[in-house]
Image: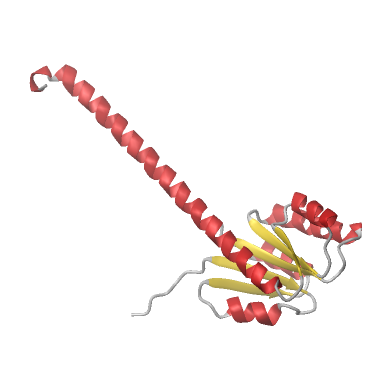
Amino acid sequence: MKKTTKAIATIYLIDELKHHNEELMYQYGNSEKYRFLYFNSEHHFLEDIRKNPPPPNEPGILIFVVNRHLNIDSPVKEVTNLLHKLNTISHGIEVIITTTQKTPETERKLKEAGVLAVVIDNENALLRIDNLIKGTISKHTIWKKRKASKLAFRILVLYLFLSLLFLIAAYFLLPDYF
């Protein structure tokens, strides 16, 4: 009997020039653990998110390859507008920006807007993206386990409280047994 695994993350890629498409498709596209979707424009991505929102119980990661220089205010505003539109449609999607040039000022502005990371597009970019994806999945898994453990702890406290109430009631109602 073949064991089927459920996708643990949805990875979106917006890359106009298909710069990272092949490498990321090779790494994440054939796996049963990830759902990998490629878009060549922001418009197609937002259209697809409106039609098919990601499941709320699994992490969504957007890798946005910005082929323009981010040292001008206009592309930063473009990315900020994309983040605003994305947050109105679907919450919880982590955004990773890759660019050929970044400055501390643009990185600060983008992180304030809600970007998880800004990665310089060089030979180490795919390794950093892979680490960010796995870190996001780990963070989401830890959050789910913490939520489950809080529920279990509340049930245990409720059980102990009801047991104590039962013992107190039994002590007063049936003092011969104590």
For residue 82, side relative to residue 156 (left or right): right
Quarter of the image for the C terminus: give it.
top left
Name the residue at 25% across, 31% down: 163
Quarter where residue 40 is shown = bottom right
Residue 17 drawn above or below residue 110 = below
Quarter of the image for the N terminus: give it.
bottom left
Q: In this view of the protein, can residue 67 be seen by the observer?
A: yes
Quarter where residue 48 is shown = bottom right
Residue 76 image offset from top left, x and y in percent: 85, 58
For residue 8, side relative to residue 169 (left or right): right
Name the residue at 65% across, 58% down: 93
Residue 156 image offset from top left, x and y in percent: 33, 39
Q: In this view of the protein, can residue 58 be seen by the observer?
A: no
Count of numbered circles on the image:
0
Say which of 98 and 167 sits in front: 98
Name the residue at 75% across, 53% down: 111
Residue 36 image offset from top left, x and y in percent: 61, 73
Residue 134 image offset from top left, x and y in percent: 57, 65
